[in-house]
Amino acid sequence: MEPWLQLAGRLHPIAAHLPIGLFILLAVIELAGAFPGGPRLTAQQRSWILSLGFLGAATTASFGWLLAGSGDYDDTILERHRWLGVGFAATTAVLYFLRHRPGAYAAGLTVSVALLGFAGHAGGTLTHGESYLSLSTVAAASPAPTRVEDTRLFDDIIHPILQQRCVSCHGASKSQGDLRYDTREFLVQGGKSGLSFKPGDAHGSLLIKRAHLPLEAKQHMPPKGKPQLTEDELTLLEWWIDVGAPFDVRVSAIEVPPLILERLAARLGWVREPTPDRAVVLAAAAALEQRLGVLLRPLTQDGPWLAANARVKLTAFGDAELAALAPIAPALYWLDLGETGVTDAGLGALAAMKNLRRLQLDRTAITGTGLRALSGLSHLETLNLHGTRLTDADLSALESLPRLRSLYLWQTQVSAEAAARLGQKQTDHRRIARWRTEMAALEAKIRAETFRANLGTDTESRPPSPPAPTTARSP
Ligand code: HEC
């Protein structure tokens, strides 16, 4: 289609408002005029409004016709909207000729406004979906639960994802592949190829397989050009299927890996801790430096984040001193407690240090019991436990740290196997595998776009070699 025709088509929703406004106004004035003392239109004013209204309606209808050819709309509703709209435009022309015959004119105007209402509703349904006028969808937009225990896994997390990404084509108004995701009942009915999810087996599930197909693939879901599932949404769908695709459980009733928990929280928009105020933090830090003799340094020029070094005080810094850091607890980013006198009993103070990224506890007397105080440190990335008395069993306390990536265990009793087991749990292998696939595809694209000249000299005479295996090391 010519670009200007496409543009005209897109103007349809805007153009539609002129006849809508005019005819509603006309109907209201005529109705009010039926009462004593109501407004009276002159014949000339009426003719003008009707002519303008007809022009507007005819233009809108033709724009709409253009738009219908260009979009991916639900066929049934589109046809309904099309003919209601054309019907309305036609009645406006008829009205013009009936304007001198009051009875017929009143009846015509009633029909015309009714058609207008139905056409408008069908149009709204086309663009916003079947349930745009239902209270339940408005209510569903109200704030989601704010505590893990209250979250219903299917209703609050999984179904909204499907609603948002899939139901426009797999719902009441359109059920591509005979598949509907708008209710649980339809979900478990499956589509043309049967059930689209296999409880317990995400990767064997059609829904997931199709989402993982390359974007260009015909069967990729949602089809190219439509809003896609985000990485997090896909991860949550996979997890839901892997845990058996339950419909009636609350999140609190199942074991949720920390990585998933973090994504759930992000999805539900759970309140983040407010950022501490720099001026307040720096004032408190200066006072504490004086009192405790530790080093407290801002990490950036304008943020409130602090690096704290208590190691300089060695064992003169103990549990009481750690507790004294409370006023700056949320501002601590790095905390070095290595070689200090802190013990398990004092580590409870760490719970308030929600923003810690790096924590050093090396060569202290702490044990696995104390480590449990770290469980809420959801940003902790680096933890140094070198030279402590930790054993394999103690590592379980670290499984709840979703961001932990570097763990120092030199000179502890932790075995390599136990460390590797923790590593397995801390790593989202599925994501990494997906990224590797994406990377391989990108590398292939780069190769395809790279110019190579072969001059027959030593190094260039070999045919282009495949990319080096990732395990190869340079000598
Ligand atoms: C823009 C429309 C559109 C959207 C959005 C869409 N699909 Fe589809 N889907 C189709 C069409 C068309 C078919 C049928 C053709 C085919 O099998 O590829 C289909 C078929 C399917 C099938 C195969 C059904 C069967 O039983 O053979 C699955 C599974 C599927 N879609 C899953 C999804 C999921 C999951 C989403 C959301 C993440 C989604 N689709 C979003 C258009 C869409």
Image (cartoon, helix red, strand yellow):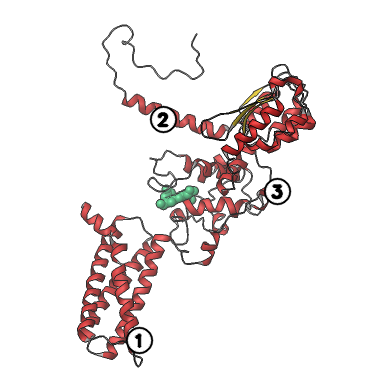
Alpha carbon distance from label 1 to label 3: 61 Å
Residue at image mark 2? 441
Q: Quadrant of residue 113?
A: bottom left
Choose mark 2 or mark 3, whichever is in front: 3
Inter-mark Cα distance, 2 to 1 = 69 Å
Crowd class of label 3 (few under 14; some 14 to 19; many from 20; radius 10 Å): few
Residue holding disc 3: 253
User: Residue 179, relative to residue 457: is it above or below?
Assistant: below
Q: Amino acid at mark 3?
A: Ala
Which type of secondary structure does the marked residue at label 3 adopt?
helix
**Disc 2 residue crowd, few under 14, some 14–19, many 20+, Cα 10 Å:** few
Figure quadrant of residue 395: top right
- In front of the other: label 1 or label 3? 1
Q: Secondary structure at mark 1?
A: helix
Q: Are marks 2 and 1 in contact (CB under 8 Å)?
A: no
Q: Which amino acid lies under the numbered mark 1 shown in the image of this protein? A: Ala
The x, y position of residue 30, in whole percent, is: 31, 85
Residue position marked by numbered label 1 in the rendering: 32
